Amino acid sequence: MKLIQFKMTGLTCEGCTCGHCGQPILIYLRCIDGILNVTPNFEDDTVKIQYDDQIISIKEMMVLVRKRGYAIDEI
């Protein structure tokens, strides 16, 4: 089990901090096989993901998020 932090755009809309805008991508991430936990920080648009690196790689996660239209960068 590993933990990684990503910077993601779209977790909040400009001026918002509730995170409602980012719920679709967070729900999507939680449903991906190998991702065990997703912890967003809406104030700085980051997300911590706990994952099983025997099932999914960092690159695979980033590709899946980008296919959904979100920008994602490893911190």
Image (cartoon, grey):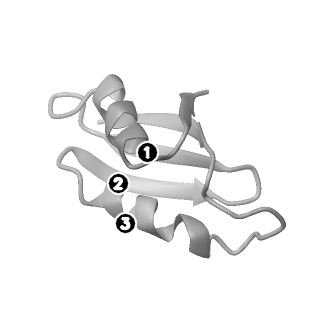
Q: Amino acid at mark 2?
A: Leu
Q: Amino acid at mark 1?
A: Ile
Where is residue 67? Give x, y as percent: 35, 41
Question: In percent of the image, x 29 and y 36: which residue is there?
Answer: 1
> Quadrant location of residue 22?
bottom right
**28 vs 34, nearest the viewer:** 28
> Quadrant location of residue 2?
top left
Q: Tag 2: Cα neighbours inside 10 Å, few (<14), some, or many (≥20)?
A: some
Question: In percent of the image, x 43 and y 36: which residue is there?
Answer: 3
Secondary structure, mark 3, is: helix
Where does the C terminus fall, quadrant-wise? Answer: top right
Q: Which residue is mark 2?
A: 29
Secondary structure, mark 1, is: strand
Q: CA distance from mark 3 to mark 1?
A: 12 Å
> Can you tell which of label 1 and label 2 is closer to the viewer?
2
Discs 2, 3 touching: Cβ within 8 Å: yes
Question: In percent of the image, x 51 and y 56: which residue is there?
Answer: 39
Q: Tag 3: Cα neighbours inside 10 Å, few (<14), some, or many (≥20)?
A: few
Question: In percent of the image, x 68 and y 50: which residue is there?
Answer: 45
Q: Amino acid at mark 3?
A: Ile
Secondary structure, mark 2, is: helix
Depicted 60 relative to depicted 18: above or below? above
Q: Which residue is mark 1?
A: 49
> Quadrant location of residue 65?
top left
Discs 1, 2 touching: Cβ within 8 Å: yes
Q: Earlier in the sequence, mark 3 or mark 1?
A: 3
Depicted 59 relative to depicted 65: above or below? above
Q: CA distance from mark 1 to mark 2?
A: 9 Å
Q: Which residue is mark 3?
A: 27
> Can you tell which of label 3 and label 1 is closer to the viewer?
3
